[in-house]
Amino acid sequence: MTAIEGHTPTLDPEEARRLRQERLERIGRWLLPLAIMILAIWLWDRVCVWNDIPKYILPRPGVVLQTLHDDAGLLFSSLLVTLRITFLSLALAVVGGVGLAVLFAQSKWVEMSFFPFAIVLQVTPIVAIFPLINIYVDNQTTKLLLCAWIVAFFPILSNTTLGLNSVDRNLRDLFKLNGATQWQQLRYLRLPAAMPYFLGGLKIAGGLSLIGAVVAEFVAGATGQSSGLASRIIEAGYRLNAPRLFAALILISLIGILIFLVLSLISHLILRRWHESALKQER
Amino acid sequence: MKLEKVAQAPMAASGDGPMLLALRDVGKVFSNGVTALSDVNLTIREGDFLSLLGPSGCGKSTALRLIAGLSTPTSGVLDWRGSGSFDRSDIGFVFQEPTLLPWADVFDNVWLPLRLKGLSRAKAAPSVMEMLARVHLTGFENAVPRELSGGMKMRVSIARAMVTRPRVLLMDEPFGALDEITRFKLNNDLLELWQGERFTVVFVTHSVFESVFLSNRVVVMAARPGRVFREFAVDAPYPRDEAFRTSPDYAALCRQASDVLVGAINSTAGSHHDGH
């Protein structure tokens, strides 16, 4: 904790080795996946060349990149559509999931009565529900949103409910002793205590909302009404336009990675001072 | 809030303050059929430092929870009549663990009871800062609990319990998990706090040494069913400090207390519910 930190001149062999190890790991954490990725892309390219694979079956990486550039206008407008559905449904999942969890936390009876419905909604495959939604809902955006929301809200609901219910018993007594109202207990104790659980659920829901959006587009896209990335993929598939298919696929992956990174960052920023999960291991 | 330096005449050991609370024939039976307390009679006087001493399972923590109002007795009454108007905000509670909000810093943790009463940060700040000074934590306002040692966490917990200036401080084996050096230091500091203001303390412990060092009255409890075994006064003047801790008087008092405790434990030894 004082000024002499890390830079002590004499290190015994064991400590020196550990320091070296740590430094290597820090570099390796970035370098290794990158190297493997580059190697894989190179192999992909080689396989195409060696086997003379036509580009409508498997395009070379360079061609995909070229398509990404050439079709940028089309692809990015589709990207925006998918992004919009994904984030809107994630936002709704947060509102719905947390809202329901808070409602459930008010009384065991409410939770007991309604939680099974949430489970039913969760375990029924969305692809099977979609035709119904297609019949009942006219608005295209609403349709997709509803679909993605059904997929994404459950982890938030279930995690937040768990968090709200796992408050330390003594702390609960402390609030009782100090005459805290229900609202105060929620605001100052249960919601902060549920935060790590909620953020865990959020990370899962982030990925799911993208999946939900893409699946919904797929199903809706079959009827030719959608313009998101998934419908570009279907379209490209019909036309044997493999390069564009790959380009769209890469964009979807990138959204997924982006969502994960952003949510991880948010989670880290909120929890870094107090929660075990965000603390650096000290030895 | 006044810090009156009471001319510290050696306190009459039995406590001479007016009655604050009387437990009359108090019993508690849990829904699983376990009798936690049976026929407990106990008088607590204003200004007492009273220890509940006993082996585990003797119901001392249950008694404390009854006094705090966190639980209700199955039989008997808690008579607060001696205390004039008395409500929950007159009680401060210190748990076995520090029980702090892990996401809140030291200031916010101590602020909590006042915050729950609707005091803003600015309004509460003087009380919070004064209390932190009294538990020797000035300068740590912005630390979060995980950055503090066990002893410091417990200090925060005590500051939080005291920030509302309660008339009664209930402590449930607060120093049981601390190392000896830290425990001694906290014992001294707690006594200092208590002597400054002479609030009433009910202190649950299983340590003979701690109970004798701190209190003017020790209530020894026995288990199965939990009951008061014997009560005795600790006839030693305050202030008590490190010199007292090493004095022959203290040793003799500890010996006596220990004998009573052994008696209490033996009184249950014949019970066939031992494995409970």
Image: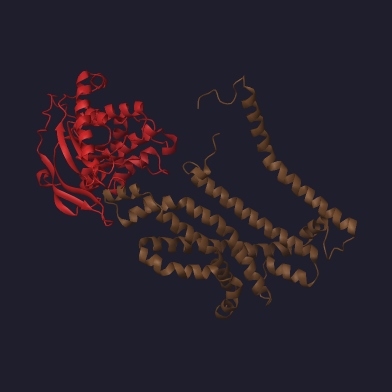
Q: Is residue B87 visible?
A: no
Residue A102 sits above or below residue A262 on the image:
below
Left or right: B133 as drawn, with respect to A233:
left
Quarter of the image where one finds residue B50: top left
Residue A197 vs A232, above or below: the answer is above
x and y percentages locating residue A78 in the rendered image: 68, 65
Front in this rendered view, residue A73 or B119: B119
Q: Position of residue A189 (x, y in %)?
A: 37, 50
Residue A73 lies in what quarter of the image? bottom right
Image point (67%, 67%), residue name: A228
User: Horizontal and vertical percent for residue B56?
Assistant: 29, 41
Q: Is residue A267 left or right of residue A20?
A: left
Is residue B176 left or right of B198 when viewed as pictured?
right
In the rendered image, the residue lying farthest to the bottom is A135
Q: Can you see residue A196?
A: yes
Question: Splitting the image into 4 quarters, where does residue B60 fall?
Answer: top left
Tell me where residue B113 appears, x and y as whole percent.
Answer: 29, 45
Depicted B19 relative to depicted A222: above or below = above
Q: Colour of chain A?
A: brown
Q: Nearer the viewer, residue A230 or B253?
A: B253
Q: Is residue B220 above or below residue A94?
A: above
Name the image colouring: by chain
Question: Residue at point 52% right, 70% down?
Answer: A121
Please tell me the colour of chain B. red
Quarter of the figure that contains the N terminus of chain B: top left
Q: Residue at x 80, y 65 (%)?
A: A242
Q: Give the residue at x 61% y 55%.
A: A259
